Amino acid sequence: MLIVGAAGRLGAEMVRAFRGSDVVAHTRASLDITDGPAVAGAIADAAPQVIVNCAAFNDVDGAESAPLEALSVNALAVRSLARAAAAVNATLVHFSTDFVFDGTAKEPYDEGMPPSPRSTYAASKLLGEWFALDAPRALVLRVESLFGSRREWTGRRGTLDAIVAGLEESREVRVFTDRVVSPSYTPDVAAATRYLVETGAAPGLYHCVNAGRGTWYEVAAEAARLLGVTPQLVPVTMADVQMHASRPRFCALSNRKLDATGFRMPTWTDALRRWLEARAVPAA
């Protein structure tokens, strides 16, 4: 098992999930995935059975002013990984995003619905999907609104981190009432990944989010209830906030294909409860 992007929120969880296996974990410091020859060399040396790519350029607004960097990490680097995977006959696991859709749906997107990216970030991630699926055996998992950071996490934080921090500090928290999401808890995503790898699931594209959906306002209200605090939620709409990059309004994904493999993702409310309980326990 070779994991790239191992220092990130999802990558660190993937390393934990595969503990007990023979894992080679690469961070940005040890392997620059935009360096094609370096990627080919590292994978040839390790000769892994499985390559898990958790590295990504995920600054959605920043990608609008740095498109080449976004494409280099999210697309061209994935092409290098796919070629290297083919050379050693390895399975490639790659993660993508709900942003490949335009957000105009009324029901959760399944894997058969045509993508329609509306930003540089989204387009770079869609290209990455296509390059990953060029590998002889590839699993591409679309995730969404990842959360799962420990309280002491110092890396890039997600939307839920910001919401919970505001609730805990009794601050006003601005939350969208018109953006529908299916949050993804990193330990659950990692568990699903391990299941697909170890059961030899059919290669291809899978959606992998916690079951159910809600607006960010509903997610924030549930977090406040679980924390036992009185929230100061400020409802806003997407039209109220100026952002450099377009965001899909309806982002919920359907797990039906993943369910059919025998792995069912817990609900996002259950995942949120488990995360908040884990955050409350001091790090060892």
Image (cartoon, helix red, strand yellow):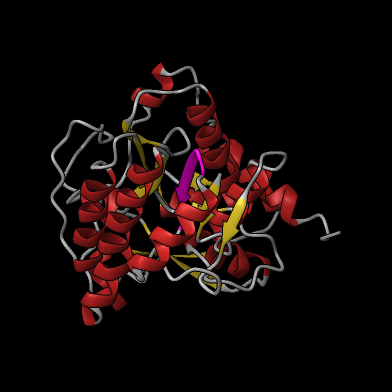
In this picture, residue 102 sits left or right of residue 212: left
Q: Which quadrant of the view contains residue 240?
A: bottom left
Q: Position of residue 124 (x, y in %)?
A: 23, 61
**Which residue is painted at 49% across and 64% down in the image?**
158
Magenta stretch: includes residue 86: no
Residue 165 vs 25, above or below: the answer is below
Q: In front here: 275 or 237?
A: 275
Q: In front here: 97 or 133?
A: 133
Residue 239 vs 272, above or below: the answer is below
Q: Which residues are magenta?
A: 48-54
**Which residue is painted at 48% across and 28% down in the image?**
196
In this picture, residue 130 sits left or right of residue 141: left
Q: Position of residue 221 (x, y in %)?
A: 53, 51
Q: In front here: 174 or 1?
A: 1
Q: In front here: 207 or 179?
A: 207
In this picture, residue 60 sits left or right of residue 52: left
Q: Position of residue 13 (x, y in %)?
A: 61, 50
**Which residue is painted at 43% across and 19% down in the image?**
261
Residue 2 vs 28, above or below: the answer is above
**Which residue is painted at 50% across and 61% down in the image?**
5
The total number of labels drawn is 0
Magenta stretch: includes residue 49: yes
Q: Quadrant of the N terminus?
A: top right
Q: Which quadrant of the view contains residue 90?
A: top left
Q: Quadrant of the C terminus?
A: bottom right
Is any atom of residue 23 visible in this view?
Answer: yes
Q: Position of residue 230 (x, y in %)?
A: 64, 59
Residue that lies at the very extreme toward the bottom in this rendered image: 65
Is any atom of residue 241 visible in this view?
Answer: no
